[in-house]
Amino acid sequence: MSEHSTEPTTMIHLDKVGKVYPGSKIPAVEELTLDVPRGEILVLVGPSGCGKSTTLRLINRMIEPSSGRIMLDGKDVTKVNPDHLRRQIGYVIQQIGLFPHQTISQNIATVPKMLGWDKQRIHERTESLLATVGLDPDQYRDRYPKELSGGQAQRVGVARALGADPDIMLMDEPFGAIDPITRDRLQNEFLRLQAELHKTIVFVTHDIDEAIKMGDRIAILGERSKIMQVDTPERILAYPVDDFVNDFIGTGSTIKGLNFLDVRSLKLTEYPTMVVGDSVESAEAKLREASSEWLVLLDEQRRPLRWLKTEDLRSGSGRYDDKGGEVVEVLHQDDSLFQALEHMVQNVSGSSVVVDANGAFQGVVQMAALSSAIRKAQREAQRHYEEMEDLA
Amino acid sequence: MEALTNWFTYVKDNFEFILEDTLDHAQMVLIVIALATVWSVLLGVLIHSRPIARSIVLSITGLFLTIPSLALFALFIPLVGVGNPPAMLAMFLYAQLPILRNMVTGLDAVSPAVVESAKGMGLNSRQQLFKVRLPLAYPIVMTGIRVSTLLTTGIAAIAILVGGDGLGSFLQAGLTRLGLPNSENSVWVGVVFTVLLGLVLDLVLATFQRLTTARGLRI
């Protein structure tokens, strides 16, 4: 979300936009109404052939809508010169489409040049954009597209789309043809970039995981681009409105939803602990009192060391280096519950340890807490939808 | 060996005429190629995205190549008289096909993604053509121009039969008095210098193509 704009304004507003191809009775896109607030990434996701790309291309009128209105930043652009319109909108496609006969700098300078920027300004812009997308200008400015890898080419594709600093970016499966590792890196870099640039972005993908990762909001589209559900990823994962959405987000959606909840939102479970040097008797008493199988051994600074059981306490002679199990990883307040789940699986006790900023023990997260957090999120999402229905 | 020395002597003795005919020959070829290039590029752009016109035009230009050149040369005499004009008109018709076909192929070969991204950035149709599609088709068109140049260089040798200029004069002079002194030398001058001219023109065009093709498009 944009931090510098005082109130959220609608940047892209589609008003009953439809597309019927000549000679076809069935519309490709049926009366679509959609708002994208300034600074938001809206992801259009849906099965192939649902018209999500068509919908995207209606916004910059690569495909002329047959009905409805397109409002960008409050202006009706349904009838303006489409070429002028497109110069104001960044456009990134999966196949990238860099101009093979031009250098990387020339490619990035395409729109600024058309807009009549002076040479110096164009030069400064292309240099800074190359740096922005993580390509060293000295090394890349004079290269040709064929001398780039797929990942590098798409970085240039993004830089070129950002050329004249458009407010709006349209991205059609931009990372779809890139290997998974590079894709993950490009996604992360792009999100970091977006945190600075606050562009208003419509992003098309068929990959629900990419949608969940990239989207401030996700619109799940069915046939003819009918919006089945549009909401934040966490609410869609917590409360898919119907079978179509449920099927589309697939199995494991609840676990994916854990990504959006953090440790801070949980009440930590009290857990027996002992500090190195404490007596075995006092530790045993704590275990009995809490009727717990495990306790956490802490060092003098209360940093967690090991998981210990009653028998580990008895057998040791004040040293527990090889007893019980190591505390493999620790959670911080801003870690996600997905990480908490992962640590649970890794730790011998089936719980995960939370520490404060100094690394001192704060409590543990147990499975029951996760499942109640999920149920709480689901209840909240459901209540949200019920309220919306009541309003309607 | 003696025949070869003999031939070189003949070439030396007649060098002034040979040079003149070679230059005439080259001039005809270059004018025809220049006109055919302009015409074919324009026609190619026009028919490229019109499937019906495209197949009709390509079939007709292909048809020209099947008409025997001598007949085609003679066909134009009633229209434009004798001399270079009927010859050049016929050469023009032959020169069209390779350039036109390569023009269309070159435009076809432009990646749809490149055109899509050009359009998406707001290049209008004219800018798409001049800044993207033509520059990308250029190397392929250039290849067509080179083929046409070789083709018309050979065909131009027949121009003499309809009263035109060029190295055909040595062929005709030799062939009409075959067996007489120097007749074979004359024929060989016609053949060798036509081939040499073709090679030189191709070399010049190849160098030009190399120098004018963007580094990103070179293979």
Image: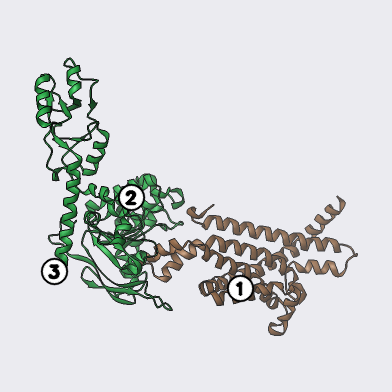
Chain colours: A green, B brown
The mark closer to the camera, 3 or 2, is 3
The mark closer to the camera, 3 or 1, is 3
The residue shown at (16%, 63%) is A386
Q: SS of the residue at dot 3?
A: helix
Q: SS of the residue at dot 2?
A: helix
B28, A202: nearer the viewer: A202
The chain under label 3 reads A
Q: Can residue A117 be seen in this view?
A: no
Of the numbered discs 3 and 2, the one sitting upstream in the chain is 2
Q: Which amino acid does label 2 sit on?
A: Leu
Expressed as whole percent of the image width and height from the top left, the position of residue A148 reads 43, 48
Quadrant for residue A206, please give it: bottom left
The residue shown at (77%, 74%) is B161
The residue shown at (11%, 28%) is A288
Mark 2, residue position: A130
Expressed as whole percent of the image width and height from the top left, the position of residue B57 reads 60, 76
Residue A391 is tagged as 3
A267, A42: nearer the viewer: A267
Categorize mark 1 by other alpha carbons within 10 Å: few (<14), some (14-19), many (20+): some
Mark 1, residue position: B58
Q: Are marks 2 and 1 in contact (CB under 8 Å)?
A: no
The residue shown at (14%, 21%) is A276
Q: What residue type is labelled 3?
A: Leu
Is there one chain holding both mark 3 and mark 1?
no
Q: Are marks 3 and 2 in contact (CB under 8 Å)?
A: no
Label 3 and label 2: CA atoms lie apart by: 48 Å
A370, B131: nearer the viewer: A370
